[in-house]
Image (tube, helix red, strand yellow):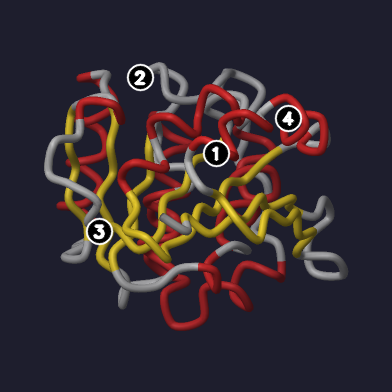
Amino acid sequence: MPEQLEAEPAAAAQLFGGRISVARQFTSNLAAHGEERGLIGPLEVPRLWTRHILNSAIAAPFFGGAAVDVGSGAGLPGLVLAIARPDVEWTLIEPMERRTTWLSEQVAELGLANVTVERMRGEEWSRGRVFDVATARAVSALRTLLPYTAPLVRPGGTLVFLKGANVAAEIDAAAKQIRSYGLTDVTVQIVGEGVLDEPTRIFRATVSR
C-alpha cells in the first residue's frame, strides 16, 4: 500500500502565498507518481512537504531575473521555486529522459509559463553565461558542482545551493575550485528557523569574473 502524504504544514501557505494551490497540486502529483516513476524514494512521501517542498520553497527570496536549476530531477528545487517565484525565468537542466518527461508534464499541467526544460548535463550548456542565479539541491559536493554551474552565470551573478550539514567541509574541500571560478562573498546561511521543522542551509557566492 502506498505511503500517505503527510498533512500540509501551516508554513506552506505562508511560503507560497497566492500560489499555494499550484504547490498543492505539484506535491499531490509527486506523492502519487514519484516513486513509481523513479523520482523519489519509497520513504519520502510521508515527509514530502517538510523535507522537500518547504525545504526548497524557503530559498525563494534568493532568486531573481533568469535562474537555472542544474540536475533538477523531480523538480526539487526548480519546479518548487518556479511555483513560488513566477516572476523569475527558470531553466531546468536534467540529463535523464524520464525526469525531463516528468518535468515537462508538470510545467504543462501546472501552467508554468516561466519554465523551460532542457535535457542535458550542466557541462553541455553552450549558450553562454546567461543566468543571474544558478541553483542545485542534493546533486553533488561543491568541488564537483562548481565546474558545471559557475560557467553558466554572468559575472556578478550568484550561486545559491541547498546543502546539507557538512557544507563547511565541502567549502574547505572546494577551495581550489572557488579560486578558479572567481567566487567571492562565500557564505552559508541557515534559513527557515522558527518556520520549518528542519531549517535549510544555503551556500551562496558571487561569480565575480
Which of the two discs, 2 and 4, sits closer to the camera?
Answer: 4
Which mark sits nearer the N-terminus, 1 or 3?
3
Q: Is residue 180 above or below residue 67?
A: above
Label 1 amino acid?
Answer: Arg
Give the CA separation, mark 3 to mark 4: 35 Å
**Label 3 packing within 10 angstroms: few (<14), some (14-19), many (20+):** some
Marks 2 and 3, Cα distance to the nearest angstrom? 19 Å
Which amino acid, by three-letter code, is at mark 2? Arg
* Amino acid under disc 4: Glu
Residue in the image at 16% along x and 65% along y:
113
First along the sequence among labels 2 and 3 = 2
Circles 2 and 4 in contact, beta carbons < 8 Å? no
Q: Which residue is mark 2?
A: 37
Q: Secondary structure at mark 2?
A: loop
Mark seen at residue 110: 3
Residue corresponding to mark 4: 170
**Type of the residue with mark 3:** Leu
Based on the displayed image, in which of its 4 quarters is residue 197 positioned?
bottom right
Instruction: For label 1, count other residues whose C-alpha is less than 10 Å away and answer few (under 14), some (14-19) or many (20+).
Output: many
